[in-house]
Amino acid sequence: MIEKKYEKVDAADLFTGFWDEILENENEERTTGKTIQQTVTSARIAAFQADKLVDMLKYIQTYKAGDAPWTPPHTEAISLKDDYDIVEAAYKRTKSYCGEGAVAFLRACPEFARHGVLESIEVTDDTIRTEWKRLREIMLEKDPKGAFMLQPFISQAVRRHRHRP
């Protein structure tokens, strides 16, 4: 009988290895410029830890699969590690969904959803850079595992009529 020997595996090391690989893939997309083209990729989805953002991205996937009744707004996922060029490209894509006035909504997404960490804010061509920078600095200090969603600003009147036919 041949005796088999197995290497001991430490679960914490295994988890750290998986997490490091996720972050490496996300960073590669950022450094190669892929993130400028699209902020919602499987590598980035895996790396986000912000509850509100993760839940929205899961809902969007469910909607695209035909299993959700409400049409989600166009959503860009912004990491606190992203440079402004990524934010600017995401804002330009979002603007095409904003309609008249091109007002978007920069939504703060703390690691664990809760009120009061940082309020979301309307942004325009004139304010996106300043507001993103200001909110990012606060998030880095108060909730460094957080993120942002960038979406078209949707008025209350429009919100009532977004159910899938």
Image (cartoon, rainbow, N blue to C red):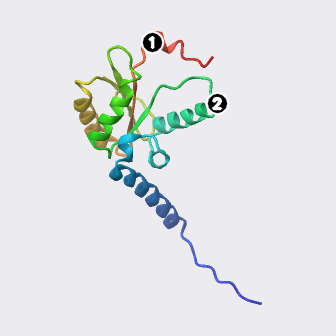
Q: Depth check: 80 or 129 in front?
A: 129
* Quarter-of-image position of residue 98: top left
The single residue placed furthest to the bottom in the displayed view is 1
* Quarter-of-image position of residue 133: top left
* Quarter-of-image position of residue 82: top left
Q: Position of residue 22 (x, y in %)?
A: 46, 55
Q: Is residue 118 visible?
A: no
- Label 2 close to label 1 by CB (< 8 Å): no
Few, some or many C-alpha atoms within 10 Å of disc 1 (few <14, some 14-19, many ≥20)?
A: few
Q: Position of residue 26 (x, y in %)?
A: 41, 51
Q: Position of residue 134 (x, y in %)?
A: 24, 34
Q: Depth check: 160 or 111 in front?
A: 160
Q: How many angstroms separate mark 2 from mark 1 (CA)?
A: 25 Å
Say what amino acid the circle numbered 2 marks.
Gly
- Residue indicated by mark 2: 66
Say what amino acid the circle numbered 1 marks.
Gln
Q: Position of residue 106 (x, y in %)?
A: 35, 29
- Secondary structure state at the residue bearing disc 2: loop
Image: 138 above or below 68: below
Q: Is residue 63 visible?
A: yes
- Residue indicated by mark 1: 156
- For residue 94, side relative to residue 69 (left or right): left
Which comes before the other along the chain, label 2 or label 1? 2
